[in-house]
Amino acid sequence: MKTIIILAIHHFLLKIYFQSKINQYCKIDKYTIFSTYSKLIQFKNIKTIDSVDRHSDCLKNENLIEGFCIVDQNILQSENLIKNILNLSRKIENDTKIKLVFIRVSGFVIEEGFSNKFQVLKKVYIGLKDSELNFYFRNKLIKSCDQLNNVTINHLFNSINLNTLEISKSIKLNRICPLIFQNSKINAFLIDRLVQTFYMWQYFKFDNYSGNSILDLNSDIQLLILIQVIKIKLDQNLINPYVFKSLSELRIFGEVLFVQKNLFLFFPYLKLFKFDGQNFRKFMHRIGIDWIKYFNRNINLDPFNFSGIFSNYETIVNFLISFNSQEYANYYYEDFEPLFNLNMTFPEQDFCIYKNFPFNQLIHIYFDSLDYDSLTLPNLSCTTLWLIYRTYMFNLYYNSLNKSKDYFEYLVNASKILNKVSGCQFEKRINLCSLRPSKSSDLDVTVINVIYYTNFFDGLIRFYLIPISSFIGLIVYLTSVYVLKKSKALKDKNQANLFFYIFTISIINSLICFSQLFRLIPEWPYGLSNKIMNQVFAQYLKIILFDFSGCILKFCSNFVYVVISIIRCSYIGDKPEKFFVMTAKLNPKKLIASVLIVGFTLSFIKLFNYEINYINPVYEYPTHISFQLVKYQKYSMIFLITALNLLIEFINGIAFLIVNLVLDLVLIFKLKKTIRKQANTFSSQNLKNKRMRAVMMKPIWIIVINVMLVFLLRTLEICDILYSNQRLIFILYHNHFINWAKFYYFFMFCIRTNLARTLQIVSNFCFIFSLTVQFLLYSSFNNNFRTILSDNLKFWKKLKK
């Protein structure tokens, strides 16, 4: 009956797997495929673009193409590329936008000659993902702007007017010459993930070039968006005054360490500055407000002269502090409650930072969490009120235009804004600022701070600690295998079974350690443009070697360790329990074979968690099966898949942990009882002394230390279970099976900040480290095993002497 149920579940999973549409594709030719799910055409050879047949089997029934992907290019020559893409787009679909994504491209060729821009009515989006921002001119890498001095160039960015240019997970080792943006017209320039830390350096910087050619750059970029930035510096190296001369809007989400004081003096058209509220308080404590005074520096207008402000409406610079934006950190599935609100970001003690804010320079502050048209304001701190009440009153004035003369006065009185202002006693607060420090060192941790530290520990553990511990474990267990194979221990009548299990677990653990060394291939922690992790073989490596085989090996290792613990218990005492004796006498080869079959069956679900991602750049590599199931709200299927995963993870993690803990406690109890009996014997023979007692208690202390250490290391596997089953938690919460909102929001915070991922990696490291601890236990507890090791290894003999 059990076999029938297992086969039915496997058949159901196979049906789900092969019916999945996310990674289904149709092969147009040798170098071109079409995704039937995401409606993307992928090219591995750009020369085949103009030869794509609109009436081919893959495209004849398609009226809409979402985009075009060009992947795995060494140095991309853009000659006729845009032209061919536009022609193909006209033949296939009538959408109002064209999306072109470059993935894993090592560089771009810049050609000499005047750029004849293609005139199209469609909005053109170009994205660079996992690529290197290297540019080549005349077969040489551009390292200096002198290579482009007084040269008219033509390339990807200036051959057509772009609605959006997005650079994501891409790196640049050399500075970018600003002349590359010659004659470029881009509505929105988006850069995702800029990092300037001691352990990771992913930046986008311009060469400091001041030649005559820069004056005729003719670059027109309206909007610059910096997302998930960590410890960056805002200066002319990042926001070049010539490239972004026409900039009208700037959005920054993340942590900024430094702002060039006079930077925004060079951007006269910049009228909207958007910053995320989660990091704004730390930003202002670190930077202050002096840099803001360079906006509208030549304007001095009474902030209460609302008619004068209205006359200069187009000159107003708006600061928008966003608390509800999801762009400041990764997010999953749904909106997430902001960690910080207005009063937390602008508390009373921060008033002195803003006391000299240049309101007279037509600078208005807006918060997206505050309704400026409402006559009922929430309870605000005096710092918040100081920053917004002038802007709020101007909004009331703006709403009263074309109304009666007394309507503005009515709105002011109805809102009671002046009463709130009077209650804050701003003049008194300003006078007190000389008596207190304006900045505080006690600032709350933000999401981006957590991301910063988790990324650091993520790289440290994956790149250093796990490989080192895996290598040590591999050497230790291979040594154990070699010694046991060479010795006569496996033929010992009394302890043959025990040594066979030690021999088996040594092989299993050495395989686990060996497989962990290969994790560096698909999970390289540094350099977000790694081209290996997205390859098909690396995806198969993750699914088959790490997930499926790793789960089987972990199950077998845990089970064999339980058997070894039971056999150890059978050796202690005059009359060991029948269960221990029966287990010790079982045929070890048949038992190991049975364990392998059970482990294979329970781990079989791991083969169905992911699909190979051939074409979809927005999904992970490989793609989790739940992406499609969530989209179509097939929660029952997700629940089944996740529940089966939870079963094996619970067994491998918590269940074996509890069993081992119980067996170790039984072992300690039996040892203690035996030692007391021996102590009484020694006492009757007048042999009792402190030294003898210490020698007899040594095995107990070794086991106690091992129990505490292994329990501590293995307890973190709960984090691994929670992370691996995040989708199940999501479904349970949204279907009201879990009503513990605080736990859910904390869990989602851990997911968004990569904290859960880091804890999972820590759990993996602790598991590898605990394997070595087990070996030390064998060698210290079992005299025969320790003797065999010392007799067969020459350097152990030297150490012994």
Image (cartoon, rainbow, N blue to C red):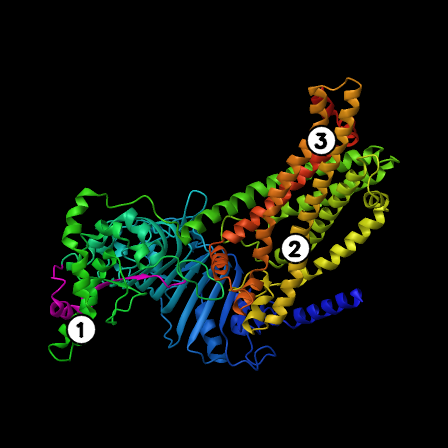
Q: Percent x, y for residue 469? A: 62, 39
Return the mark for residue 188: none
- Please, which residue is most extreme toward the top here? 686
Residue at coordinates 70% horizontally, 58% vertically from top-left? 603
Residue type at mark 1: give it. Leu
Q: Nearer the viewer, residue 37 or 640?
A: 640
Vertical comparison of 442 with 186: above or below:
above
Q: Percent x, y for residue 784? A: 79, 30
Mark 2 and mark 3: Cα distance apart in space: 30 Å
Return the mark for residue 699: 3
Label 2 packing within 10 angstroms: few (<14), some (14-19), many (20+): some
Mark 1 and mark 2: Cα distance apart in space: 62 Å
Q: Percent x, y for residue 403? A: 15, 80
Identify residue for label 1: 411
Q: Percent x, y for residue 462? A: 56, 46
Which residues, given as a range, are shown in magenta? Answer: 299-326
Residue type at mark 2: give it. Phe
Return the mark for residue 650: 2
- Please, which residue is most extreme toward the right here? 493
Residue 17 lies left or right of residue 632; in this view the side is right
Q: Look at the image and say whether residue 9 sits in the magenta stretch.
A: no
Q: Look at the image and say whether residue 324 sits in the magenta stretch.
A: yes
Vertical comparison of 241 with 27: above or below:
above
Vertical comparison of 227 with 398: above or below:
above
